[in-house]
């Protein structure tokens, strides 16, 4: 069984089965969250190693909905990316996807944002460097954030954000698998 799917199931079990006798539900959830964060970080580090990149582990985020799961973080050095890096095209992060009609796994997020353009493009690259899906990229300089990553599963899109001195937002149009 896939490691990320395993830790989500483990998270559900930790929440459902009290580990500390009669501990308060909030205590059990905090313990489960700690275990989940540890497993998530380890799985993302292993995925990054398979892609031969280094990631930031202090801002990993994930979301699950129905049978879909997405985890997201930036690359090491993310805060030092320049406009020239974005114009040339660069990997900005690592994303894990499961249950969205794409092969389950880890993907490098490769972004190209030409200087002076109002939009750019992003690609999810598999381990072999093959683009499995493309999406438009938008920048939001009105709300700059540093070192934070977000993710959201909506009806027909999965959004992943990478924040530096500007915010990079990518919304991939992919649909939850109904067969899972």
Image (spheres, rainbow, N blue to C red):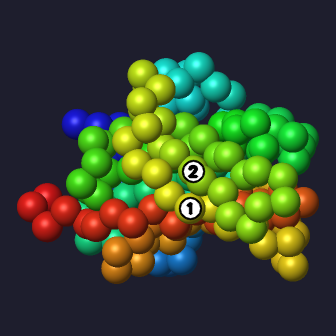
**Residue 64 coordinates in the image, percent (x, y):** 39, 66
> Where residue 135 sits in the image (x, y, percent)?
50, 58
Q: State the image coordinates of residue 112 (x, y, percent, origin top left).
A: 68, 46
Q: In the rendered view of the protein, which quadrant contains the N terminus?
A: top left
Q: How many marks?
A: 2
Which residue carries the number 2 mark?
122
Residue 55: quarter of image: top right
**Which image quarter is the C terminus in?**
bottom left
Q: Is the residue marked by circle 2 packed among few (<14), some (14-19), or many (20+) residues within 10 Å?
A: many
Rendered image quadrant of residue 15: bottom left
Question: Can you tell which quarter of the image residue 164 is in?
Answer: bottom right
Q: Are marks 2 and 1 in contact (CB under 8 Å)?
A: yes
Q: Residue at x 70, y 37 (%)?
A: 90
Q: Secondary structure at mark 2?
A: strand
Q: First in sequence, mark 2 or 1: give its number.
A: 2
Q: Nearer the viewer, residue 23 or 26?
A: 26
Q: At x 41% / y 71%, what residue is drawn?
A: 157
User: Residue 136, labelled with which disc?
Assistant: 1
Against 41, residue 34 (above or below) is below
Q: Secondary structure at mark 1?
A: strand
Kindly report the distance in space between the C-alpha atoms of the residues bearing marks 2 and 1: 6 Å
């Amino acid at each position: 069984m896939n490691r990320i799917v395993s830790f989500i199931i483990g998270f559900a079990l930790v929440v459902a089965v009290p580990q500390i006798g009669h501990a308060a539900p909030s205590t059990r959830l905090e313990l489960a969250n700690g275990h989940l964060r540890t497993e998530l970080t380890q799985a993302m580090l292993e995925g990054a190693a398979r892609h031969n990149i280094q990631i930031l582990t202090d801002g990993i985020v994930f979301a699950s909905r129905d049978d879909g799961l997405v985890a997201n973080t930036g690359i090491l050095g993310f805060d030092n990316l320049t406009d020239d890096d974005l114009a040339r095209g660069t990997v900005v992060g690592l994303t894990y996807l499961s249950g969205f009609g794409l092969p389950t796994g880890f993907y490098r997020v490769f972004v190209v944002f030409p200087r002076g353009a109002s939009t750019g493009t992003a690609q999810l690259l598999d381990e072999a460097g093959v683009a499995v899906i493309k999406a438009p990229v938008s920048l939001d300089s009105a709300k700059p954030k540093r070192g934070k990553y977000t993710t959201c599963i909506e009806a027909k899109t999965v959004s992943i954000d990478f924040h530096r001195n500007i915010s990079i937002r990518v919304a991939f149009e992919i649909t939850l698998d109904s067969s899972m």
